[in-house]
Amino acid sequence: MYRVRTFNQIAAKGLARFPDHGFEVGPDLADPHAILLRSHRLAVADLAADVVAVARAGVGVNNVPVDACTKRGIVVFNTPGANANSVKELVLAALLLTSRDVLGGFDYVRSLADVADDAELHRLVEREKRRFKGHEVAGQTLGIVGLGAIGSQVASAALNLGMEVLGYDPKLSVDAAWRLPSDVRRMENMAALFARSDYVTLHIPALAENVGLIDAKALSGFRPGAVLLNFARQEIVEERAVRAALESDRLRAYFADFPSTALAGVAGFHATPHLGASTAEAEENCAAMAVEQIAAFLRYGNVANSVNFPAVALEPADGHRIGVTNVNVAGMLRQLMSVLADANINVIDMINKSLGDVAYNLIDLDTPPSAAVIAQMQAIDEVLSVRVFDPIEP
């Protein structure tokens, strides 16, 4: 029986994706094999001895101690793309709200709540509406930094609105490139994108190299009166620099999914309370993807969408499966095979992949490995973990 401990409220439709038999799931389970969470900040102390997997129902894993997990051979999953449509729709809402001063119009109409005469109300509205005149987005230029699952969907939607779309992503994957509309104009650097864009939207992770990426120097290259949208991560933007850019009219507006004390009350700053993935559909999609990844890993050792392990998939075969995680150094596979050969155990099938400093092996054997064989493998220098799976069903 595999035990999966949950933190936060996980969508029921997602949890229903666990197989009917062989899994126990809940928030109060002791000694879990896997952890499923959303925003809960996971402590190293939460990683019980039997934990082999952590899945975040979302993209960012800054609430998971990834380095500590890697050192123990614990795979960390996320769910890229599962909430992409939800975030895309909120970005479009922000784009339209900042192009036509809809928010200012809302506030003005609310200020007229005490006007009791319809004729007077309409007179005031007609007189003042010019204050909230904006621009159509059709014909404007949108610059997108980050062309992954969300960025590519934003690009498609913006093209459908009649915008010109520029994109910059030095780490664009082959899969992401296939998803990207051909009408998106790829830029060689961010400075060129900023200089040509009326609107700039950010869709990059909060990796160390991206923290504070949008600083005073970057903002100085923006087109005067541009709008900056940030529905990625708060840390990407240097907020004091944004404040200065708003106050000098270098930026017309900054719309973020993160309230900020540094920007509170500044004209042109708008924020939502981290609503990007807060739709029923996104929560269900993220939960379902996370559940399927946990189940595939616990049952078969297969890995998809991990931030610290390579993608590995090996079809079940008749036999007995082990999974070995080791530091990615030369000679490890030879040492593992030597242990099996000395025990007269034949390898039916296997796969070996690496990601950075981590290598991961799935090995199907014709004979169940003994405790002594597993102990020999575990004793090899640089081996992080060894798992023995139940006999694999064909």
Image (cartoon, rainbow, N blue to C red):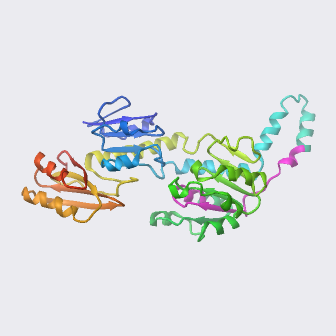
Residue, far front: 381
The residue lying toward the viewer, choosing from 357 and 361, is 357
Q: Is residue 321 magenta?
A: no
- Left or right: where does residue 311 sit relative to residue 224? left
Examine the image and state in which quarter residue 50 appears: top left
Work out whether 196 lies above or below 47: below
Residue most extreme to the bottom: 188
Query: Which quarter of the rendering shows the N terminus?
Result: top left
Q: Residue at x 72, y 46 (%)?
A: 269
Q: Which residue is pictured at 35% across the width and 55% down the height?
A: 309
Relative image position of residue 138 (x, y in whole percent): 72, 61
Does any portion of residue 66 appear in the rendered image?
yes
Q: Is residue 348 left or right of residue 129?
A: left
Q: Is residue 152 magenta?
A: yes
**Residue name at image x 79 percent, y 38 percent:** 107
Which percent across, then down, holds residue 172?
A: 50, 65
Residue at 38%, 53% in the rendered image: 306
Q: Position of residue 178 (x, y in %)?
A: 49, 66
Segment colored magenta: 128-155
Residue 314 in view here: no
From this view, report whether residue 81 is shown above or below residue 280. below
